[in-house]
Amino acid sequence: MISAFFIFNQKGEVLISRLYRTDLKRSISDVFRIQVVSNSDVRSPIITLGSTSFFHVRTNNLYIMAVTKNNANAALVFEYLYRFISIAKSYFGKVDEESVKSNFVLIYELIDEILDFGYPQNSEIDTLKTYITTESIRVQPTAVEESSKITTQATGATSWRRPDVKYKKNEAFVDVIETVNLTMSAKGTILRADVDGHILMRAYLSGTPECKFGLNDKLVIDQSERGSSDAVELDDCQFHQCVRLNDFDSDRTISFIPPDGEFELMRYRSSNNVNLPLKVLPTVNEIGTSQVSYIVSVRTNFNPKLSATNVVLRIPTPLNTTSVDCKVPNGKAKYVPAENVIIWKIPRIQGGQECTLSGTAQLTATTHRQSWARPPIDVDFQVLMFTASGLLVRFLKVFEKSNYHSIKWVRYLTKASGGYQIRF
Amino acid sequence: MSFARTAPKKGENYELRADLNSEYREKRKDAIKRVIANMTVGKDVSGLFPDVLKNMQTEDLEQKKLVYLYLMNYAKTQPELVILAVNTFVKDTGDSNPLVRALAIRTMGCLRAEKIIDYLCDPLQKCLRDENPYVRKTAALCVAKLYDLKPELVLDNGFLEQLQDMVSDSNPMVVANAVTALTDIHVAATSLPSTSEAEKAIFVITPATLSKLLVALNECSEWGRVAILTALARYKAQDDQESEHICERVMPQFQHVNGSVVLAAVKVIMIHMRHVRREELTKQLIRKMAPPLVTLLSSPPEVQWVALRNINLLLQKRSDILSNEMRVFFCKYNDPLYVKVEKLDIMVRLAGESNVDALLSELKEYASEVDVDFVRKSIKAIGQTAIKIDSAAERCVNVLLELIATRVSYVVQEAVVVMKDIFRKYPSTYEGVIPTLCANLDELDEPEAKASLIWIIGEYADKIENADELLGIFVDTFTEEAYPVQLQTLTAVVKLFLKKPDSAQGVVQKVLNTATKDCDSPDVRDRAYIYWRLLSTNPEAAKAVVLAHRPPITLPRTTVSAALLDELLGEISSLASVYHKPAETFIGRGRIGADAVPRRTAEDGDDELSTKKALQTVVAGQNAENLLDFDDAPADDGQPSGLAATTLTSTPAAQNLLAGTSSNPLDDLVSMFGAGGFMGGQGGAVPPLGNGFGGGGFGGSGMSGMSPIQSTPAPPVASPAKQQPSEDLLGLF
């Protein structure tokens, strides 16, 4: 499988290198540097030269790279690379050149633990943290018993949980976070609207709790069962490995023994009856070849008691724009020449309101006559206590031997980041 | 603390050595860290081997790991010194702490020094039977490491049998790693040509193992699931019922959050579904497969891309999987280019009468984006849609006209190329468009676009009043044009002459003269000679050949042969499925040797199938020679120039046949002249010629990449070009 793992900085210097198999030499990193890092036109995340394949992903100007020499499982390699990034994030916050350099010992320890002979091993963050720590462990005779526990847990059927967790106060927090994707045509028709939902849970529960999780009563998960229009329909859902997939498959119950602490319980996707929290109505006219006029309205489409926060509209301007005058009733709008956009930031809008930007961009004369490509307007926002899919958490039941009382909290957040696009 | 980038000082290794031998523990540990940092950036610190080794015996687990890391790197270069470490390793494998035991056995397997291997067997034996599952799962993989180094030791010590027993272990992680190790060994063993059949059967999955695997599947980690699913994909079901059983048990894995588990499950289902007889179960499987596939599009772009390449394959087999889901493949403005290109291809595959309007308005939108490559591919997709859906052709043509009106050079040129294919598919339907196309004549500077327009002019020479003037422009600059343009000019002028003999006499004389005297391409010269003789000896025969009716073009449902498609579907989510090429073309020796092909044939038993497969393998292997092209090849593959996908043949056999006739056009021409002397006596030979060549060279429809009968140099990625060498290679077998 994976023959080697590397981390490069933007200049192509090797920050981390680990060979897992004998079929490669360390100098293979030079090939990657030449073919990818110093190549300005890389058009594929996998590059195969001879029989060697390079898989890379980028994060904060780092290249995280795996090399294989066989017909490797490409999806697995990329999933692994992203898993490495998320583990690294959880260990030392931001993953960038500086943090990789200062944590290189820890990184070596981690990649030896999660990858053996090129095959991914246990990669549960929670479990890893029990035996790979930032402070060095001294092996004391008393720790041996602890190690046995750790190893049993790391390999067991509930590899994600230690049996001896204890809390004074038993609490569970559920966050339903929905990311809305929208593509709206220039005519105002919705080409595509869907929701990527994540249900995150922070469980601080003692013992080995058995949880049952319930969503809306009228929840339709299978397309064939669709019928009533008022139901919340999910196109698909995926679960953390603690959820018993067989149970879900047979009677749609979501039952599990949760890991301790934070984890992603469920992911889902919905494309029916999506409530779009923000409507954007752009009117953009090119006046001759020297001006473009903008009137962009934003209307909030939810209960007035709620509000959208951190609203950021990125409104594209032609490449030959010299200056932009614009007026906004709410927030601040600024022309950013480097990115060819007007950025309009609105800290907060209540539900059921509308505000409008009006402005004009001045253009210089150009010689090339290609018309302006008009990239879409991109909107980012957050709305608390609102779900675009209509999904609600009905119950979370916790059963434990000791029968303790537990407190549960639910929060909802709908947001858009980079995928809410309006063409004009 | 950062030790990673201290500037090289004089005598740095000397300082490190002093620190490694320091009496203070912290100082020694810091020194080890600095050594590792130097090792990472590629500095040679092998000279410090004995000094680092001294720090191996420690209570500090972190320090131990660092020393081990160093050992793994340099054991190969210092084999004599590694022996010194053996004692500590062997001692550690008996430590009371399972983490230490596992670490020792894991590292020993990675040392890869001949001398230490013999000392590995005893501790490994012990660790395979360890009471702690963490140690057992580590030891299981160590067997695979040992096999990689010295297979005899694994066989002699009975480690294989032990691994096979471990498949029934009570711990799911141990089961997963035993399966992983066995698969690894199995793959290594089967790739060795010398071993006999019996020795190769290292990991045979029996019905008894099957049930154990199915149980472990639900309990083990995500990576373990992938390993088990990969093993299940290799299992040959005993009967229909067992296939159904496997499918039903694997189906819940579609709901797993890890994309590689989902794709591995899809792979198992696609393989075992072939034997499922129950119609409703098949339907259910297909229905349940769709949502998780769509969900993969919410993954990071790289995973998305792997998923899209595989969805493309799945659609070639079962076009019904995602029939209502075209909208989810609409490109986002900020998608990476490689994702966008794949989405385009899939959108065309999903296009039907019901969604074609939405598709066209999307494609039009894409055609105004910034990236030239993507714009061109979008325009190509419009042409493919026109050819795929008859009823939408007119709407497609209108969109193309709107695009031509933008007068952006590359948009216009691509649109002209696409229009040529539409004319080919719907002859005499959109003649009204021709004036608009001709008005853009001056805009064209790319050979393919020029050749396309010239073909159109030649084809409709009788309808275009000033055809002789237009073609005259190209005849005047004949010698400066690229060969494909020259070939098209030649053919178009002859067509014009045959249709309007009076007005074109002069121009045809001129072009034949120039082409035979001043042209340095033998293809162009030869074609000119043939035309000349045809025209001078038998104008009727010339008409039959040059103006012959051409077979219609269609959009092929698959981009690979049926046999290869099945093979690739059995390898979903692997590199082979991403590249749509058999693994042999890019692993091992880079391509399959000639001696390997008959062996494959013998193994498979299914002669016809495997011969075809082998052929394709060899051909693709030839292309793999140019592996440096892979930079952009994966995205471009199967999307050759023009509507290359619209070859007039759909079966590989027919393609081979045609490729056979065309592999060396000169041969055919020579024999023709040699035998006939003059064409007049060969009236009988004309019709077959018309069929054989009519689609291509002679008929003049031979646009680059459009027909396999093509004597012009086609781009290396074009499928027709791929087929050509196969003819020469046939001689090998």
Image (cartoon, rainbow, N blue to C red):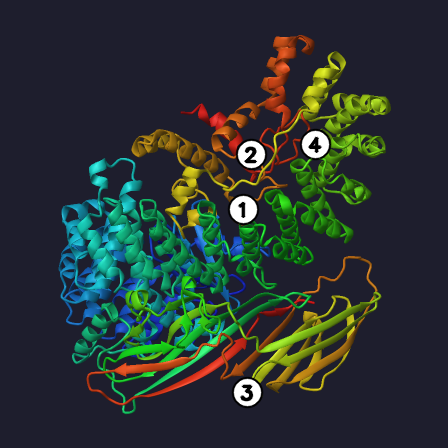
Q: Could you tell me the amino acid type at mark 3?
A: Leu
Which numbered disc, 2 or 3, marks the residue closer to the eye? 3
Q: On screen, B558 above or below B463?
A: below
Residue pointed to by mark 4: B483
Task: Please give the residue where the numbered disc 2 appears in the rendered image.
Answer: B720
Query: Looking at numbered disc 4 in the image, what kind of residue is underneath it?
Result: Tyr
Which residue is under mark 3? Answer: A306
Q: Are marks 2 and 3 in contact (CB under 8 Å)?
A: no
* Lower sequence index among marks 1 and 2: 1
Q: Are marks 1 and 3 in contact (CB under 8 Å)?
A: no
Give the distance between the C-alpha atoms of the residues marked 1 and 2, in whole angstroms. 16 Å
- Name the amino acid, label 2: Pro
Q: Give the structural element (helix, strand or loop) at label 2.
A: helix
Q: Nearer the viewer, mark 1 or mark 3?
A: 3
Q: Give coordinates of residue B723: x percent, y percent.
A: 52, 32
Distance from the alpha carbon under mark 2 to that under mark 3: 61 Å
Q: Residue at x 50, y 70 (%)?
A: A195
User: Which residue is painted at 78% across and 69% down in the image?
Assistant: A285
